[in-house]
């Protein structure tokens, strides 16, 4: 039995029969390639001429803090809205390249995303809309969303 298993499977580095046949190795390699392509694609996240900016969201007892990476934009290119418990950041990054002509340049690589974008996230609780603060500095949009009074945590005393 062991002889037939050894003939049908690969040998590992130590010379012992491997439990993974060529079929499993090929499948593993194919899955690795698919995952690599998924995370290293040069295609825009939401279709041609658009992209989805990356963001971080942190929570304290009183606020939600959101940071959105938007390099190369001006504050006037951005829009921030809160509707119900959904925060939406949108705008447009204008293309800086053109076909050879106007500026005499011929593009060889065009990998930076440009076009319209819109990114929406659901906030975990209600926020105080009158106290929202948004600042854009060094390519990062920082939004502070104070929690509404009813959404703040409170310690409840347990009586015995």
Image: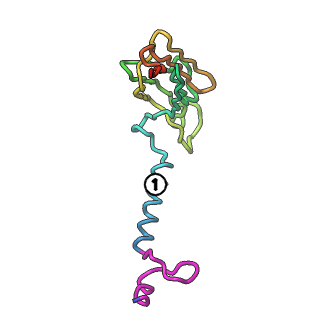
- Horizontal placement of 53 versus 48: left or right? right
* Front position in the image: 98 or 158: 158
Quadrant location of the C terminus in the rendered image: top left
Residue 80 within the segment the image draws in magenta: no
Q: Is residue 41 above or below residue 77?
A: below
The residue lying furthest to the left in this view is 84
Q: Which residues are magenta?
A: 2-22
Q: Visible in this render: residue 121?
A: yes
Q: Visible in this render: residue 79?
A: no
Identify the residue at horizontal 44%, vertical 65% (top origin).
28
Number of labels in the image equals 1
What's the coloring here?
A: rainbow
The residue lying furthest to the front in this view is 160
Q: Toward which corner of the image does residue 44 lie, by quadrant?
A: top left
- Horizontal placement of 8 versus 36: left or right? left
Q: Which residue is tagged 1?
A: 35
Q: Is residue 146 above or below residue 47?
A: above
* Front position in the image: 45 or 49: 45
Quadrant location of the N terminus in the rendered image: bottom left
* Main SS of residues in magenta: loop
Identify the residue at horizontal 49%, vertical 33% (top origin).
53
Coordinates of residue 65 in the picture (x, y in percent): 53, 24
Coordinates of residue 38 in the picture (x, y in percent): 45, 50
Q: Toward which corner of the image does residue 116 lie, by quadrant?
A: top left
Identify the residue at horizontal 42%, vertical 76% (top origin).
21
Coordinates of residue 31 in the picture (x, y in percent): 43, 60
Residue 6 within the segment the image draws in magenta: yes
Coordinates of residue 82 in the picture (x, y in percent): 41, 18
């Amino acid at each position: 039995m062991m002889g037939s298993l050894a003939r049908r499977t690969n040998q590992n580095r130590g010379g012992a029969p491997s439990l993974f046949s060529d079929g499993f190795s090929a499948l593993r390699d194919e899955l690795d390639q698919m995952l690599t392509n998924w995370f290293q694609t040069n295609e825009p996240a939401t279709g041609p001429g658009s992209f989805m900016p990356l963001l971080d969201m942190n929570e304290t007892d009183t606020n939600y803090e959101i940071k959105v990476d938007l390099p190369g934009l001006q504050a006037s290119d951005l829009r921030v809205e809160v509707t119900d418990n959904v925060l939406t950041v949108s705008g447009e990054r204008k293309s800086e390249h053109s076909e050879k002509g106007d500026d005499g340049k011929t593009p060889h690589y065009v990998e930076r995303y440009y076009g319209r974008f819109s990114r929406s996230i659901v906030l975990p609780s209600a926020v105080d809309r009158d106290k929202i603060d948004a600042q854009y500095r060094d390519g990062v949009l920082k939004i502070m969303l104070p929690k509404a009074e009813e959404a703040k945590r409170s310690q409840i005393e347990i009586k015995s």
